Image (cartoon, rainbow, N blue to C red):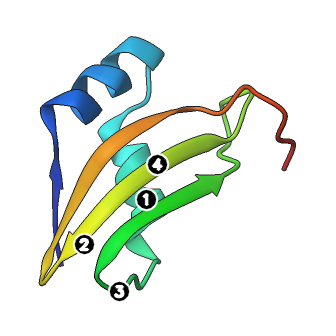
């Protein structure tokens, strides 16, 4: 499956210091059906869990946004 990053997702990753390789690692083991999905996962090296929103259409997975989830969730 091909993974693309939206302009917004690339800018959020730069803003919060999230390497694209980290996002790819989180998404690599997921088998997602068509539609929009929100993934919240604790990643080593980050104080808060990362929230990644992706849209799946056919064989293309587009990362819409990604950021540390600071409000009210502890994983």
Q: Could you give the CA–CA distance between mark 2 and mark 1, rounded to whole angstroms? A: 17 Å
Image vertical order of residue 50 relative to residue 55, above or below: above
User: Quick one: label 4 or label 3, which is nearer the N terminus?
Assistant: 3
Residue 48 spot, x, y in % from top left: 73, 31
Classify mark 4: helix, strand or loop.
strand
User: Quick one: label 1 or label 4, which is nearer the N terminus?
Assistant: 1
Q: In the visual, does 43 lie left or right of 8?
A: right
**Residue toward you, 25 or 15:** 15
* Quarter of image, res 2: bottom left
Q: Name the residue under label 4.
A: 52
Number of callouts:
4
Q: Residue 56 carries which label?
A: 2
User: Quick one: label 3 or label 1, which is nearer the N terminus?
Assistant: 1
Q: Residue 17 carries which label?
A: none
Q: In the visual, does 30 lie left or right of 48?
A: left
Q: Could you give the CA–CA distance between mark 3 and mark 1, rounded to whole angstroms? A: 18 Å
Q: Which residue is drawn at 70% across and 48% down?
A: 42
Q: Name the residue under label 1.
A: 25
Q: Residue at x 25, y 21 (%)?
A: 11
Q: Could you give the CA–CA distance between mark 1 and mark 4, rounded to whole angstroms? A: 12 Å
Closer to viewer: mark 3 or mark 1? 3
User: Quick one: label 2 or label 1, which is nearer the N terminus?
Assistant: 1
Classify mark 1: helix, strand or loop.
helix
Q: Could you give the CA–CA distance between mark 4 and mark 3, rounded to whole angstroms? A: 15 Å
Classify mark 2: helix, strand or loop.
strand
Say if mark 3 contacts mark 2, CB within 8 Å: yes
């Amino acid at each position: 499956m091909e993974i693309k990053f939206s302009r917004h997702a690339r800018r959020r990753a730069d803003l919060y210091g999230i390497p694209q390789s980290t996002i790819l690692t989180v998404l690599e083991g997921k088998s997602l059906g068509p539609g929009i999905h929100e993934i919240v996962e604790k990643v080593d090296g980050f104080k808060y869990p990362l929230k990644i929103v992706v849209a799946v259409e056919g064989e293309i997975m587009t990362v819409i946004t990604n950021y540390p989830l600071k409000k009210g969730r502890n994983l």
